[in-house]
Amino acid sequence: MADIQGTSIRIADTFNDIPASTLDGGIDAAFATVNGATFLYATGQTADGFSIFSVAADGSLTFLDSITDTGGTTLDNASDIVSFQVGGNQFIAVGGEFDDGVAVYALSDTPGYATFTDAVFDSEDPDYELNGTFSLAVMEYNDRAFVFAAGINDSGLSVLEVDGSGNISVIQNVPDDVNTALSIPRLGQIVDRGTGSFTLPVTGGSQGLSVFNVSSTGIVSLQTTFEDTSVLSGPAHPAGALIGNDEYYYVTDRNNDTTNVFVRDGFDLELIQSFRSNAVFSDNRDGQTFQFGDTWIYATSENSSGGTTSFYAIDSILGSPTAGHLSLIQTLTDGVDGDDLASIWFGDSITIDGTSFIVGSARLDDSLVMFEVGGGDDVLDGTQSADTIRGGSGDDVIHGLGGDDEIDGGNDDDIIYAGSGIDTVYASAGADRTFGGSNYDTFDAGFFNGAAGGVQIDTAFDLFRTPDGTKQLVSGFEKLLGTSQDDDIRGDDANNDLRGLSGNDVLNGRGGNDSLRGSNGDDRLLGADGNDFLFGGFGADDLRGGSGSDQLAGDAGDDFMLGDNGADTLNGGVGEDTMTGGNGADIFVFENYALGATEYDSVRDFTSGSDKLDLSDFGFANAAAVLAGATQRGWGVRLELDSDQVVALEGLNLADLSGADLIL
């Protein structure tokens, strides 16, 4: 099973520094989810602090507050920032290059969004490697949180642990030696190998790349080092990716203007790809990997005004001869594709309601940029297994191929082919064209649950109309799911499964043996041709079976039920229901509910000798016990089933009612 996402990039939002914020000279940003709300925390080196933003589902940013350096904190020339959770609480840690330390803040979703809890400084112990703290990494495991901090003036790294109260302490110090690349170190993010095994990539200012093993208790030990100045003479931040069981590491080099890809082969690092383009990799300062399901992306940027920011797809196909290799997705140029793309330093990534974002700090523009992943025009192919495929924004073309897939094209004008398998395609905005496959596929319109009106789906005419009136082509789907609004859903000659969900819905099965479910609301269900099942749900529903032997279940509410032609079964459920069997030998089912108040149901056309009353839920001993509760009235027979359930058999003579008419 693959989790496949669009990789084209769209700028979702840009926030420029304002007097109240602290984005001047920013180089890092981190997301955190606090009580279900998404926030972004972004540092500013020149501003000596960090800013706090709320993040909407479309990636737009709203400034909330800023925190600046004070006595006891480490925000002087604030550099890297990481977020993590421990003890059920959410925290961020911030490195201060000029304060030589790391500060921790507890996070809240209300004003006072970040509260200082503790800090550690290089001056506290000569063994600490925090002088010039510039880059951080974080690892969470078994409700413990470890922060890795590199001091560029100490040429080493320290490992720190943060407890559930936000207290921070140093647990290990690793100085540079002849075997490590820790001179002027830059940390990559932790690579999680699973089952408590991790790695940490580190580059030295001119020494190469080291990979450290990290235990489940945060302790690091050197695994291997690559040193070759013809390849890495000025390496920037490293990044890693785990594809299957193989580790890949990515390092841009400022001096050689190259990006280099390594695979860890046992105890060695093997260079498998290196390429150069002066138009892309000129004085490159940052590179970062991001994972979205089974999709990996590598992003890098030039350190100049008018420079470029490039996004690469990482080949993540297991067994591929080019596994781990990079291929260009898209390049954005400062001043052409946006005015705030000068020297992007990539921070964190997040997925909100199915849409993924990468945040970057434009160091030379003093701004934040939210990049939507999959926001452009993608062509995505699934596999022969069950896949999850998300196109995101843009005009996408998606082929589900084999397997039972879940496909979401995202906004804009998409073309979706579900392929073989039992697939589910989720509706979205835009003029989409969506085609089911050869099996029993589902089209789900739930994307429009919050819209002002309902949707119209008519598979006989390949029509899907969104609440704003946009027409989409939807063809080849048997199961149709509506919204929480008032929907109009109509099937075709196949055996359809139509579900209105909430709202006052109209469901029409047309031909075939259909299942229609109204759920909440006052729904109108028409089975039409075929042997259909109709379920009203909560509300005063109108159920009409049409031709064929239909089953009608009113559920809760005062329902109107018409079996129409055929031998039908009608069950009103809770509520005062009106039932008409129509032509054919029909069965009227009554169940024993503890109602607390008398409820009256009506059967308008009961025919003795043909129709049946199913009273098996009441536990009557025999027909005589039932008939003892029957009395003749001018309009028909009043049948008392218990103290709070009465059935009116309209137009019937009591003398015609016998035990042969009962199912006990």
Image: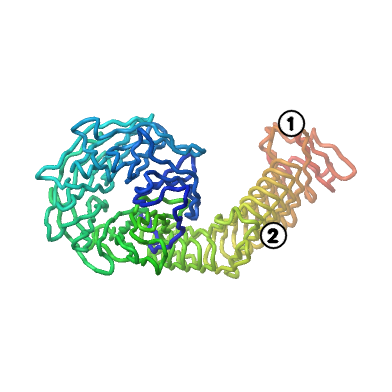
**Is mark 1 in CB contact (under 8 Å) with mark 2?**
no
The quarter of the picture where residue 297 lies is: bottom left
- 448 w.r.t. 415: above or below: above
The answer to whether residue 490 of the structure is visible from this angle is no
The first of marks 1 and 2 along the sequence is 2
Please name the amino acid that badge 2 sits on.
Gly
* Neighbours of disc 2 within 10 Å: few (<14), some (14-19), many (20+): many
Q: Which residue is mark 1?
A: 596
The image shows residue 48 at horizontal and vertical percentages of 37, 44
- 156 w.r.t. 127: above or below: below
Please name the amino acid that badge 1 sits on.
Gly
Q: Residue at x 73, y 41 (%)?
A: 575
The answer to whether residue 186 of the structure is visible from this angle is yes
Q: Label 2: state its secondary structure.
A: loop
Mark drawn on residue 546: 2
Mark 1–mark 2 Cα distance, whole angstroms, equals 34 Å
* Neighbours of disc 1 within 10 Å: few (<14), some (14-19), many (20+): few
Q: Residue at x 18, y 33 (%)?
A: 127
Whether residue 29 sits left or right of residue 415 in the image: it is left
Q: Residue at x 26, y 62 (%)?
A: 326
Task: Please name whichever residue, 132 or 465, is drawn nearer the observer in this view of the structure.
Answer: 132
Task: Please name whichever residue, 599 or 609, is drawn nearer the observer in this view of the structure.
Answer: 599
Q: Label 1: state its secondary structure.
A: loop
